[in-house]
Amino acid sequence: MSFNLSHLLHQEYRLKPPYQAHPMGVSLVNSDGTIDTYKSDTPHAHAREAQNFSNRINNYLSSEEGRNFISYTRQHHRRFIDIKRIGTADHGNPSIVAAVHHNGLEGVLLSNYDGMTFDERIEQMAQQYQISPNAMAEYVITHELTHAAGYNTEAETEGYVKTYFEERARLSLGPEREKYQQLAAIAQEREQEAKEAGK
């Protein structure tokens, strides 16, 4: 196959450590629904997780929550990179749930597999922050798409996510408002942690 995974992930999308040092297993979903898998010792598991994560992202983008975030971001004059493909990879770092790898113009959006699905990682985070898995998934996807809108550091990304969720809380009522208040508080906590860590 002429497709060069090393060029795609290490050059075109300029992965930073620890990604470059880790032999990634990667599966990417194509626009026609087929899946390309590279350097995987568990190709079926990677392909299954790539499809699951792609479905998650596409469902979010077509949902009211996703449309609200896209609209909010465009109103703030931010442009999204062109996400060429969605999939999964072994990132070599268990604290990563998902990541956008890009060159400033285009890139890929990948969940972190390493033997644990996106849904399983979301369940862990939801328990940690004591919110529902669906709310946690919305948080993580919003966070990654904020990176795709040009926010690179964790501190500035969490700051933007916090402001967005505060806005959604202001415009919402009842349980929806409570959800966004909780998500804004999580983003504020993570923003402070990122600032303290210099990230």
Image (tube, rainbow, N blue to C red):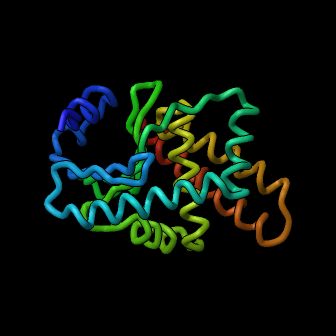
Q: Residue at x 49, y 74 (%)?
A: 127
Along the line of sight, the residue nearer the viewer: 75 or 108: 108
Report whether residue 130 is seen: yes
Q: Residue at x 45, y 46 (%)?
A: 31
Where is residue 38 drawn, in percent x and y?
20, 48
Q: Is residue 8 left or right of residue 182?
A: left
Q: Relative to residue 97, is residue 72 depicted above or below?
A: above
Q: Residue at x 34, y 56 (%)?
A: 112
Q: Relative to residue 110, is residue 132 depicted above or below?
A: below
Q: Relative to residue 62, is residue 119 depicted above or below?
A: below
Along the line of sight, the residue nearer the viewer: 40 or 190: 40
Res 90 → quadrant: bottom left
Q: Quadrant of the N terminus?
A: top left
Q: Is residue 134 left or right of residue 101?
A: right
Name the residue at the front extreme.
32
Res 52 → quadrant: bottom left
Q: Residue at x 40, y 40 (%)?
A: 108
Report whether residue 96 is seen: no
Along the line of sight, the residue nearer the viewer: 40 or 183: 40
Q: Quadrant of the C terminus?
A: top left
Q: Is residue 17 left or right of residue 130?
A: left
Where is residue 142 drawn, in percent x and y?
58, 50
Where is residue 115 drawn, in percent x and y?
25, 67
Q: So how many labels did they put on this image?
A: 0
Q: Is residue 103 left or right of residue 131?
A: left
Where is residue 103 drawn, in percent x and y?
39, 26
Res 160 → quadrant: top right
